[in-house]
């Protein structure tokens, strides 16, 4: 501890001993002085551009994780950097005690893009989900007539909506949940993709159904084609809000602005995050019509940083890029390449592979490697991905990746699978 503490003190004081820290030093310092809430791969990234990142020793890696979809537009996207730099020279934070000149244009553009009337801005994806929960409960009491403190929300097993205390209360992931009780009541969990189970779980207390159109953390699980339409029908019939958590799946990842578009479904509310901040800063929002968001009044919900001018400038640019740029088409076109090539591995070291747009979950034969081991070996070959559960890894390259680079990364995947099969 003493040596790493001295190293940290020297470096923070601007005197790293005449040279920059090595990857080994960076990792040792981080492990010694940070809480162990992550288990990162031993890669220390110093720079990024487009789909590529470079570590402190100058090694380059193809980034096929893209910040869990936060970097949909790639590293150092020039349009986003220009918007951020321009706003940094003007004003970055006013709080919501005042209006700012980015706020109105941003929320208007976002609402129009997804066909809704109102936006409630926050910062992180988990905050967007917490907002959705609060709004659903308020709506249930004021509009539906549910008795006070009895509102329930139906959710899906294997979900991932964040790690706040309320959210982990309905998580089925023991790592996220265990040891953090007592848990917040009011949630009913049913199997993902089972619309009949959702219908059965609904009663007079039900405020909302909260669903990921595609489950990301679970391994990019795409539901049956009729699942979301049936959820929409049930919610309409039972007078229940349908809230779509599009924090990971939205804003281009699946080749559409909203993953719900693949099923032709329009939920009552969208929850956005990650890519909404363009990888520049955390930005999130709940987007719905007035009859839903109108239940929130001054003082009942908010955030000092939610809707700040810097977020507005970047968020407006994200909306413009999605409506005018090539990103959705890239995700659709290259998504076909990704899906086709991953299927070629099935039965040859890969048990199964699922994809939608530029987003894939790959289940590697557990007799070959765990997901963590596969990711470590891929990093050694210059490709960055991240494991989720067991032997499952996720791929979500930025939407700016070229077909040549995507194929290069998949070639490296083939090399690693081949090495594992050969026992090397």
Image: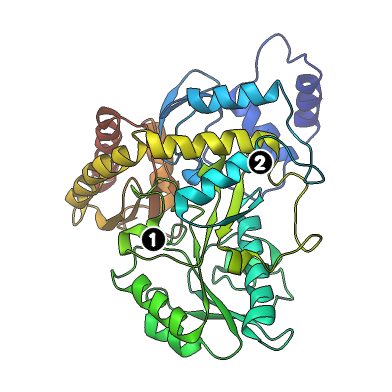
Residue 184 vs 67, above or below: the answer is below
* Residue 375 appears left or right of 181: left
Residue 220 makes an appearance in the image: no
Residue 380 makes an appearance in the image: yes
* Residue 171 appears left or right of 405: right
- Residue furthest top in the image: 18
Q: Quadrant of the N terminus?
A: top right
Between marks 1 and 2, how big is the CA–CA gap? 26 Å
Q: Residue at the spot x=41%, y=30% of the render?
A: 51
- Determine the secondary structure under disc 1: helix
Q: Position of residue 344 (x, y in %)?
A: 17, 49
In this view of the protein, which residue sits in the foreground, 171 or 264?
Answer: 264
For label 1, the residue is: 260
Quarter of the rendering containing residue 378: top left
In this view of the protein, which residue sits in the foreground, 39 or 361?
Answer: 361
Q: Position of residue 303 (x, y in %)?
A: 75, 51
* Residue 326 appears left or right of 13: left
How many residues crowd around disc 1 within 10 Å: few (fewer than 14), some, or many (20 or more)?
A: many
Closer mark to the observer between disc 1 and disc 2: 2
How many residues crowd around disc 2 within 10 Å: few (fewer than 14), some, or many (20 or more)?
A: many
Q: Earlier in the sequence, mark 1 or mark 2?
A: 2
In this view of the protein, which residue sits in the foreground, 278 or 292?
Answer: 292
In this view of the protein, which residue sits in the foreground, 263 or 126?
Answer: 263
Quarter of the rendering containing residue 192: bottom left
Quarter of the rendering containing residue 415: top left
For label 2, the residue is: 103
């Amino acid at each position: 501890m003493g040596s790493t503490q001295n190293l940290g003190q020297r470096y923070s004081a601007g005197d790293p001993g005449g040279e920059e820290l090595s990857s080994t030093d960076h990792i040792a310092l981080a492990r010694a002085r940070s809480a162990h809430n992550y288990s990162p791969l031993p890669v220390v990234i110093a720079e990024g551009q487009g789909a590529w990142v470079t570590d402190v020793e100058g090694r380059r890696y193809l980034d096929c994780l893209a910040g869990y979809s936060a970097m949909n537009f790639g590293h150092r996207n020039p349009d986003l950097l220009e918007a951020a730099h321009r706003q940094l020279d003007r004003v970055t934070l006013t709080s919501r005690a005042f209006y700012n000149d980015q706020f109105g244009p941003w929320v208007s553009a976002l609402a129009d893009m997804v066909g809704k009337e109102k936006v409630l801005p926050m910062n992180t994806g988990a905050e967007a989900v917490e907002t959705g929960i609060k709004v659903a409960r308020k709506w249930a009491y004021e509009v539906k007539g549910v008795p006070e403190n009895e509102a329930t929300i139906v959710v899906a097993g294997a979900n991932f909506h964040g790690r706040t205390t309320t959210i982990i209360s309905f998580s089925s992931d023991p790592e996220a949940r265990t040891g953090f009780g007592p848990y917040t009541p009011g949630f009913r969990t049913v199997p993902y993709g089972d619309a009949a189970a959702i219908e059965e779980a609904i009663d007079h207390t039900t405020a909302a159904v909260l669903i990921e159109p595609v489950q990301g953390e679970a391994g990019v699980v795409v539901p049956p084609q009729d699942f979301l339409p049936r959820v929409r029908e049930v919610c309409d019939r039972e007078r229940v809000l349908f809230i779509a958590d599009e924090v990971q799946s939205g804003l281009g990842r699946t080749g559409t602005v909203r993953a719900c578009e693949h099923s032709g479904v329009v939920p009552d509310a969208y929850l956005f995050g990650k890519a909404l901040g363009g990888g520049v800063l955390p930005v999130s929002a709940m987007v719905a019509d007035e009859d839903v968001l109108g239940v929130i009044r001054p003082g009942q919900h908010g955030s000092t940083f939610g809707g700040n001018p810097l977020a507005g400038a970047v968020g407006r640019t994200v909306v413009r890029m999605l409506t005018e740029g090539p990103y959705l088409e890239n995700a659709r076109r290259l998504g076909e390449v990704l899906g086709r090539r991953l299927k070629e591995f099935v039965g040859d070291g890969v048990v199964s592979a699922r994809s939608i747009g530029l987003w894939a979950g790959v289940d590697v034969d557990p007799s070959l490697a765990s997901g963590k081991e596969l990711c470590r070996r891929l990093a050694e070959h210059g490709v960055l991905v991240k494991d989720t559960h067991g032997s499952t890894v996720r791929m979500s390259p930025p939407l700016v990746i070229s077909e040549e680079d995507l194929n290069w990364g998949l070639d490296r995947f083939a090399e690693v699978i081949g090495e594992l099969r050969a026992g090397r």
